[in-house]
Amino acid sequence: MHTVMQLVKEALEQQAVPPTLQRGMLGIALTCEAVLHDAQKLVEKYKSLGKVKSRRLIDRAGLATEDVADLRNRLISATSLLTAFQTTLHGLVALSK
């Protein structure tokens, strides 16, 4: 997701993009950054799963499937938004050539 965001950012810098699309990308970027931040927090929260066996069972029991399911859904949604925007941007670039 981070890589695609960088590619879109570069494309936006190289191409004149209507303000509506710029605002759309800003909203998508904020959504993606929030999802990536929450994913990192979840990784940090459960990083001990692979370290100490005695903590492993305690942490695994605490790994709420709701947290993972919610994050998965948000990742899918943000990726879909980003992909749709990237497709629109590529179409705009193709039309301008």
Image (cartoon, rainbow, N blue to C red):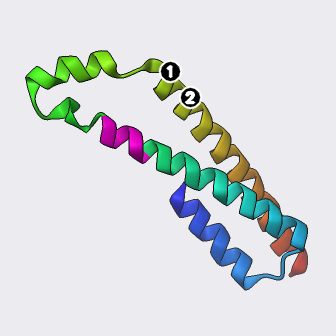
The crowd level at tag 1 (other Cα within 10 Å; few <14, some 14-19, many 20+) is few
Residue in the image at 69% along x and 53% along y:
82
> The N terminus appears in which quarter of the rendering?
bottom right
> The C terminus appears in which quarter of the rendering?
bottom right
The crowd level at tag 2 (other Cα within 10 Å; few <14, some 14-19, many 20+) is few
The image quarter containing residue 26 is bottom right
- The spot of residue 64 in percent (x, y) is 41, 20
Amino acid type, mark 1: Glu
Whether residues under marks 2 and 1 lie with C-beta atoms below 8 angstroms apart, the answer is yes
**31 w.r.t. 90: above or below:** above
**34 w.r.t. 4: above or below:** above
Give the total of numbered labels.
Answer: 2
- The spot of residue 35 in percent (x, y) is 55, 46
Q: Which mark is residue 33?
A: none
94 left or right, relative to 64: right
Residue in the image at 74% along x and 57% along y:
27
- Magenta portion: prevailing SS class: helix
Q: Secondary structure at mark 1?
A: helix
Residue highlighted by disc 2:
70
Residue in the image at 13% along x and 35% along y:
51
**Magenta residues, start to end:** 40-45
Amino acid type, mark 2: Asp
Is residue 81 one of those drawn in magenta? Answer: no
- The spot of residue 81 in percent (x, y) is 72, 48
1 left or right, relative to 28: left
Residue highlighted by disc 1:
66
51 left or right, relative to 38: left
- The spot of residue 58 in percent (x, y) is 21, 18
Q: Secondary structure at mark 2?
A: helix
**79 w.r.t. 14: above or below:** above
Label 2 to label 1: alpha-carbon separation: 6 Å
